[in-house]
Image (tube, helix red, strand yellow):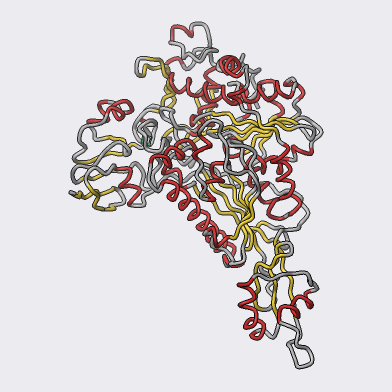
C-alpha cells in the first residue's frame, strides 16, 4: 500500500500514513490535540482544518458545513478528508485553546474516617523463649488479633520483619491487610477524589489524616478525541476495533497523569497515595473500569452494575501505592450516574426537609428533585448545544469563547482569555438569546424577526439582523473584530438547537414536579451543579425557560458538587456508605416512558414571557 507524507503546521509535525487514512486518524496518530465533537461522523462541522496543497474534492458532508469560498481556500473537515497524496495541513491553533475547567469543589464537613487506615506495630524479635510466628507477634503488638494476612504479604514478611527488627506499618481496609511497610509510615496517608466528566477530569489530592486539600489537577477528558458526548463514544466503540480499549486506556492514562501532576505540585510521591474515589456518569464509570457501555445506548438502557466497587489500584492500572484501593461511587441508572450521587451527597438533598431542585447541565442534564422523604431523578437528553457543538459559531468554554453577552446601550460581551473572540460557548449563547428575546428580535416561538417586523419594538440592534443560508441571523461580532476573520453569527438553526436543548431540561423538571405532585412555588432552592451551571447567568437561564422563570431568585451555583461529593466519600466511610443508600433510594424516572412527555416537550420549546428587567446597578 502506498504511503504519503503529511505535515501538520504550525507544529511542523511530519508523518507517513497509508493511502486512504483520514486527516483525523493522522492527527490522532501524531498525538496532536484536536477536538472531534461528533466523534468524526461529519455531523458537527467543527473539525475544520486548512489543507495547503492537494486538498482534493470535498465530500457531501463537507459541502454541508463549508461555504464554497472556504472550500476554494482549502478548508476541509479532518474527519471526512482522506489522504491520497502528500499533504500539508494547517491547524487552526498552535495548541488547543486552554479550557476553562471548574475545579472549585467547596469543602464539606464530614467525620474524618477514611476506609483505609494504618497501624504501626513494634514487636519483640523472636527468641528461644518466644518462638511465636512472625505474623502472630506482629498482630499481637498491633492489638489486632483477628487479622488475616494474604499470602503475598506473608511471603514478604520474614525478610521485612528482620530488616526492620519488627518495626512495621500495616495498611488496613476494615480487617483486611493490604500492605506491610518498613518502619513507621503513618505520616504518609494521601488520597485523591476524582470527578470524571464527559468533558473534563478533575482530581483532588487530599491528606487522609487531616482532611485537608493538598492540590488539584485537571484536564480535558482525552476521550473527547473519539466524540464529545457519551453517545458518540459508545458509537465509536461499536464501530471501531479495539474502541473500548482505546477509551479505557485514554481515561486511565489521564487519571495517572493527573495523579502525577498533583503529587508533583504538592511535593509528595504517588506511592504516598493509598485511596482514590471516583465519581462520573454511568458511561464514564463503565469506561474507567473497562466495561463496555454499549447497553446504555440501547433500550432499556441498563448499566452492567450500579453497586459501589472497591478495587485494587494496580490491578486496574492506576499508579499509586501498591496497596492502594479504588472506590467507585455507585450509579443510579443508565443515564443518572455516580456523579449525581456525589451531587446529592455534597448538597445533602437526601437530608433536606425543604424541597430542592438540583440540576447538572451537560449534554445530558441530570435533574434531582425532592427532599429527605422522596428524591426523584431523571436524565434529559439536551444534546451538545450547551457545549457549543452543532451551533454555527459554537465552541466549548475555552480561550476565545464569548461566555457572556449583554444588550445595554450597545452590545457588550466578554471573552474567555480576553483576546479576540473565536466563537461562542453555551453560557454566551443563552445570554445572547435571552437578550434577543428581551429586545423583541426573537419571538416566543424562536423566530428571528426581520428588521421590518421589529417595527415599533426596540429596534436598537436591527442592523445586526443579516441573512444567512436563506434565513435571518443575528450578527454578534463582525469579521473585523474576530480572531479568525469570520463573523460570529447566531443563526436561526442555532436558536432551534437551543430550544431543543432547553426544552429537554425544562421538560425533565416539569415531569419530576408532576411525579412529586408539587407546584413550582414549593421548590425552595435551585442548585446548579457542574461547570456549565457555574458559569451560567441564572437570569438568562430563566429568561429562556431553561429553568422555571418563577424560581429566578432561588437559583444558586454549588460549584463542582460532584467533586465535593467524591471528596466527602474519600474522607469518610460514613459518606461512602451513605452514597450506597442514596443510589438505592433515589427513584429514577425514565422520561421517554412518561405518558405526557411528548406534549410537555412540545410546549416547553417556546420561550416564556420576558422577565421583569433587573434593576440597573
Ligand atoms: S464533523 Fe468532523 S468531528 Fe464532527
The residue drawn where x is 62% and y is 14% is 609
Question: Quick one: 417 or 164, which is closer to the camera?
Answer: 164
| Quadrant in the picture for residue 270 | bottom right
x and y, in percent, of residue 587 in the image? 70, 32
Q: Is residue 204 left or right of residue 109?
A: left
Q: Is residue 140 above or below residue 382?
A: below
Q: Is residue 32 left or right of residue 256?
A: left
Q: Is residue 524 left or right of residue 219?
A: right
Count all numbered tags in the image, as a single digit: 0
Observer able to see residue 381: yes
Q: Is residue 359 above or below residue 609?
A: below
x and y, in percent, of residue 224 in the image? 45, 43
Q: For the C terminus, which image quadrant?
A: top right
Q: Is residue 519 left or right of residue 609?
A: right
x and y, in percent, of residue 327 in the image? 64, 54
Ligand 1: give its quadrant: top left
x and y, in percent, of residue 21 in the image? 27, 44
The residue drawn where x is 53% and y is 9% is 457
Q: Is residue 283 above or below residue 211?
A: above
The residue drawn where x is 58% and y is 32% is 365
Question: Quick one: 489 or 54, which is closer to the camera?
Answer: 54
Amino acid at each position: 500500500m502506498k504511503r504519503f507524507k503529511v505535515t501538520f503546521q504550525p507544529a511542523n509535525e511530519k508523518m507517513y500514513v497509508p493511502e486512504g487514512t483520514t486527516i483525523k486518524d493522522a492527527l490522532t496518530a501524531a498525538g496532536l490535540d484536536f477536538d472531534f465533537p461528533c466523534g468524526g461522523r461529519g455531523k458537527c462541522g467543527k473539525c475544520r482544518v486548512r489543507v495547503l496543497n492537494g486538498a482534493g474534492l470535498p465530500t457531501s458532508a463537507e459541502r454541508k458545513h463549508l461555504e464554497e469560498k472556504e472550500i476554494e481556500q482549502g478548508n476541509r473537515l479532518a474527519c471526512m478528508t482522506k489522504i491520497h497524496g502528500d499533504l500539508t495541513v494547517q491547524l487552526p491553533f498552535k495548541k488547543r485553546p486552554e479550557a476553562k475547567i471548574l475545579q472549585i469543589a467547596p469543602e464539606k464537613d464530614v467525620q474524618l474516617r477514611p476506609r483505609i487506615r494504618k497501624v504501626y506495630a513494634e514487636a519483640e524479635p523472636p527468641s528461644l523463649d518466644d518462638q511465636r510466628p512472625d505474623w502472630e507477634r506482629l498482630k499481637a503488638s498491633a492489638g489486632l488479633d483477628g487479622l488475616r494476612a494474604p499470602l503475598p504479604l506473608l511471603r514478604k514478611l520474614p525478610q521485612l520483619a528482620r530488616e526492620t527488627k519488627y518495626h512495621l506499618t500495616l495498611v488496613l481496609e476494615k480487617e483486611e491487610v493490604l500492605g506491610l511497610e518498613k518502619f513507621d509510615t503513618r505520616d504518609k496517608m494521601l488520597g485523591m477524589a476524582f470527578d470524571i466528566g464527559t468533558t473534563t477530569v478533575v482530581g483532588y489530592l487530599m491528606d487522609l489524616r487531616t482532611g485537608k486539600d493538598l492540590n488539584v489537577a485537571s484536564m480535558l477528558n482525552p476521550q473527547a478525541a473519539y466524540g464529545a458526548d457519551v453517545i458518540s463514544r459508545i458509537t465509536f466503540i461499536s464501530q471501531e476495533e479495539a474502541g473500548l480499549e482505546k477509551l479505557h486506556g485514554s481515561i486511565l492514562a489521564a487519571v495517572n497523569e493527573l495523579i502525577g501532576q498533583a503529587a508533583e505540585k504538592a511535593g509528595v510521591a504517588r506511592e504516598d497515595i493509598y485511596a482514590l474515589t471516583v465519581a462520573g456518569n454511568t458511561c464514564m464509570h463503565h469506561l474507567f473500569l473497562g466495561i463496555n457501555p454499549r447497553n446504555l445506548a440501547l433500550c432499556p438502557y441498563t448499566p452492567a452494575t450500579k453497586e459501589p466497587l472497591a478495587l485494587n489500584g494496580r490491578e486496574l492500572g492506576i499508579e499509586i501505592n501498591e496497596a492502594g484501593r479504588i472506590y467507585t461511587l455507585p450509579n443510579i441508572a443508565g443515564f443518572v450516574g455516580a456523579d449525581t450521587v456525589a451531587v446529592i451527597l455534597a448538597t445533602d438533598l437526601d437530608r433536606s426537609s425543604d424541597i430542592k431542585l438540583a440540576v447538572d447541565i451537560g449534554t445530558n442534564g441530570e435533574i434531582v428533585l425532592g427532599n429527605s422523604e422522596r428524591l426523584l431523578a431523571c436524565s434529559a437528553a439536551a444534546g451538545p448545544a450547551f457545549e457549543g457543538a452543532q451551533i454555527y459559531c459554537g465552541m466549548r468554554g475555552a480561550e476565545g469563547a464569548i461566555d457572556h453577552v449583554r444588550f445595554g446601550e450597545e452590545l457588550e460581551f466578554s471573552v474567555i482569555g480576553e483576546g479576540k473572540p473565536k466563537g461562542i460557548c453555551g453560557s454566551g449563547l443563552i445570554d445572547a438569546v435571552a437578550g434577543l428575546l428581551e429586545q423583541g428580535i426573537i419571538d416566543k416561538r424562536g423566530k428571528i424577526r426581520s428588521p421590518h417586523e421589529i417595527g415599533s419594538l426596540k429596534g436598537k440592534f436591527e442592523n445586526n439582523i443579516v441573512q444567512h443560508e436563506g434565513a435571518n441571523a443575528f450578527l454578534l461580532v463582525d469579521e473585523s473584530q474576530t480572531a479568525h476573520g469570520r463573523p460570529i453569527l447566531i443563526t436561526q438553526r442555532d436558536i432551534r438547537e437551543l430550544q431543543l436543548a432547553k426544552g429537554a431540561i425544562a421538560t425533565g423538571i416539569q415531569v419530576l414536579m408532576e411525579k412529586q405532585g408539587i407546584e413550582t412555588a414549593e421548590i425552595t432552592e435551585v442548585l446548579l451543579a457542574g461547570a456549565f451551571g457555574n458559569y451560567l447567568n441564572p437570569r438568562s437561564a430563566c429568561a429562556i425557560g431553561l429553568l422555571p422563570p418563577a424560581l429566578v431568585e432561588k437559583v444558586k451555583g454549588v460549584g463542582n458538587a460532584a467533586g465535593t461529593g467524591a471528596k466527602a466519600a474519600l474522607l469518610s466511610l460514613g459518606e461512602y456508605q451513605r452514597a450506597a443508600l442514596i443510589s438505592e433510594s433515589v427513584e429514577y424516572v425514565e422520561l421517554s416512558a412518561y405518558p405526557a412527555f411528548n406534549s410537555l416537550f412540545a410546549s416547553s420549546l417556546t420561550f416564556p414571557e420576558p422577565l421583569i428587567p433587573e434593576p440597573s446597578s
